[in-house]
Image (cartoon, rainbow, N blue to C red):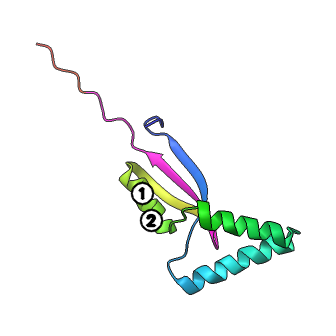
Amino acid sequence: DRLSPGGRFIYADITVASDPALERMFLDGWVAFMRDSGLEQERIGHVLADHRENDLPESAEQQLAYMCAAGFVVANRIWSYEKFAMFYAEKRTAPPVLHPTTN
């Protein structure tokens, strides 16, 4: 409701794969990335616990469906890598204002 007609909405989020084996592979890749980036094992455990307890990840397809249901006329996943995705949506432009005819 706060977005002006014709406005654009861009956001990034964690997603979940529809296939459990693929989701496990993506989660393992995320852990490897954190480890390779130098994050301590204890901190990795905290990140994963926070993800399990506080994130409510949905599939990219479900997130796009939410955007369409909310009235966005364009909704796309514009980037993704394993568990992470960036989305783009455009709000419907305002309907034309009809002026009553005067005689």
Q: Is residue 72 left or right of residue 32?
A: left
The amino acid pointed to by label 1 is Tyr
Answer above or below: position of 35 versus 79.
Answer: below
For the residue pair 8 and 34, the one nearer the viewer reads as 34
| Residue located at (54% from left, 62% from top) | 56
Say whether residue 90 is magenta.
yes
User: Disc 2 residue type?
Assistant: Gln
Q: In the image, which residues are magenta?
A: 79-97
Q: Residue furthest top?
A: 103
According to the image, label 2 marks what residue?
62
Residue 63 locus on image (x, y percent): 47, 61
**Residue 96, picture quadrant:** top left
| Residue identified by numbered label 1 | 66
The x, y position of residue 21, in whole percent, is 58, 86
- Residue 85 visible (yes or no): no
Q: Would residue 94 be counted in the magenta stretch? A: yes
Q: Residue at x 78, y 69 (%)?
A: 44
Residue extending farthest bottom? 21
Along the line of sight, the residue nearer the viewer: 33 or 48: 48
Q: Residue at image x 52%, y 44%?
A: 8
Q: In front: 28, or 6?
A: 28
Q: Quadrant of the C terminus?
A: top left
Q: Secondary structure at mark 2?
A: helix
Tell me if residue 3 comes above or below residue 11 in the rendering: above
Q: Are marks 2 and 1 in contact (CB under 8 Å)?
A: yes
